[in-house]
Amino acid sequence: MLAALNANRVYERTNCFYMITSAGLVDRQMEAGGYILTPGWIERWPEHLKEWGFDRDTARAFFGESASRLVLLDTGVLADAPRMLGELAAYLDLPTEVLPVGLDHFRLELTKIVLEWQAERALHDATSTREQAQRKLADHAMAFDLLLNLTRTMGQDEAVQGILELFTMLFAAQTVTYAQVADGQPGDISTTGAGPADAARVRRYLELLGDASAFAETDGGFCVRVTYHGETIGVLGVEQMAFPQHRREYLNLTMAIVSLCGMAMANAANETRRRQAEAALVAKSIELERSNEDLTQFAHMASHDLQAPLRTVTSFLQLLERRHGERLDKDAHEYIDFALDGANQMKLLITGLLEYARVGTRINPLVKVELRQALDTALAQLSTSVSEAGARVIVESLPQVRGDRIQLVQLLQNLVGNAVKYRGAAPPRVHVGARRVETGWQISVRDNGIGLEMKYAEEVFTVFRRLHAQDEIEGTGIGLATCKRIVARHGGRIWVESAPGKGSTFSFTLPPATGEDGS
């Protein structure tokens, strides 16, 4: 905001970062969780943290709660700024992003103030020059707006178009050409006017510039090298200007702002890559959703097609035993029992696979869930096995979480059921507890069972991976794989800590209920 105070002028900004880059860029970064830093702050970051009274743990807690990443507005005045940012990021355990902004935005802010002041003074000096000063002010404002336009987030095509519009307006040129350059060779070429965007013209510009020249004059104008961090990324040519006698002045002005063009093109290249990656991610997401739908349909069809003949086999075996059991010897009865057990195991496998396939494709929204109520439902379904094993389940206070209630019941039922099933000589003791963590809640199911070796800690979550033979402990090898799939769908992770003969603790994380403070 500008306010006139006698002969003085005060220029205010609501955010100090607005002085070195656009307000829109700063606001978007802050809204996205970025903690914005400058080279000056980065250079003395250990001293700043010490002044704030932070050690490493309190610093990590503070920055972790207030930001998702560290964002450096790199003005180019401190060559070691990116390295220092990396050291701070490692200290705080946060990701980083470097936005090269340079000092051109600040210079342009000052230039605008001076131009406005000069224009207003000209109006006061002579009424006869009022209209001319107003036209100059409008031209300057338009040029400034076009320059500011290059600082916003945009793709490469938009940035090139902005450069062409800027130099067309500044010099009233009939032809303005911009070409991207890589390894000294012209790439994509864009031009204004009726002339073709041919590579020959760009190659002529590159020949005139040679290996070291920043600019060169042509028959009808000039060409300049566009660089970023010392690397040539483009070449700009201006031809057929309305006032060729001012070519030298135009060239001087161009050299003053061409670095902004380099920064704009570098930022635009990053933005283009980001958009392409985002589009690819969306395409992958659509493909994954379609794949999940196909998987569910396949699972349903496979379940029906496999269970129908399985029921036929089971029925005829039972019929054989009922009608002809008296004529069968002991071995025959044993064979029938083996076949029925195998059929029952196959049925359990089919059911488990169907449940595993359904986890990632159910469309139930994630809502607020009382985890204790979900556990009570799971325990009710396990009441027979818990009672027969003489198990005791101890439950601490459990929180509200954000999730799919049906799947959370299945998750807890699998984990508590396993704790009862894989028991040792002593009666099973199962402890279910929760504690607050940075990402939400960590839920643990601890038992006093037979345990397992930690070399199998990852394998046990793999489909069909069992550590015990079927005749030792019954199972399908699908339960823990389903648990992992459920936890992943909720954005968490699951792991086990165990030792043979000392029980196991299965832990997993869940997001807190929306709007909850975690208490």
Image (spheres, rainbow, N blue to C red):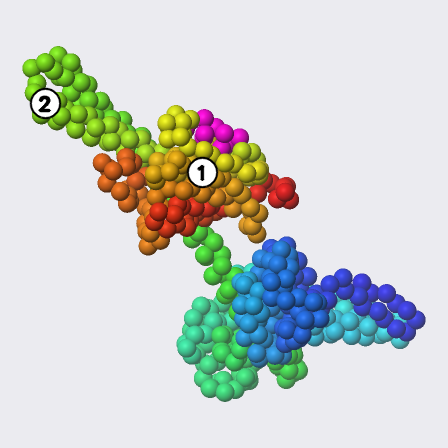
Q: Quadrant of residue 26?
A: bottom right
Residue 335 horizontal/vertical position (percent) = 12, 26
Is the N terminus in the top left, top right, bottom left or bottom right quadrant? bottom right
Looking at numbered disc 2 in the image, what kind of residue is underneath it?
Lys
Whether 450 is drawn above or below 211: the answer is above
Q: Is residue 437 visible?
A: yes
Residue that numbered label 2 is attached to: 330
Is the C terminus in the top left, top right, bottom left or bottom right quadrant? top right
Whether 390 is drawn above or below 162: the answer is above
Residue 166 horizontal/vertical position (percent) = 62, 68
Residue that numbered label 1 is attached to: 430
| Sequence-first disc among 2 and 1 | 2
Q: Is residue 293 visible?
A: no
| Residue at 44% across, 51% down | 281
Local crowd size for mark 2, using a 10 Å CA cut-off: few (<14), some (14–19), many (≥20)? few
Q: Quadrant of residue 18?
A: bottom right
| Residue at 17% across, 25% down | 337
Front residue of this view, candidates 281 and 279: 281
| Residue at 57% across, 52% down | 438
Whether 124 is drawn above or below 419: the answer is below
Front residue of this view, candidates 8 and 469: 469
Residue 466 horizontal/vertical position (percent) = 28, 43
Secondary structure under the numbered disc 2 in the rendered image:
helix
Residue 257 horizontal/vertical position (percent) = 63, 76
For the view shown, which residue lies furthest in the front direction?
Answer: 426
The answer to if 381 sits in the magenta stretch is yes
The answer to if 470 sits in the magenta stretch is no
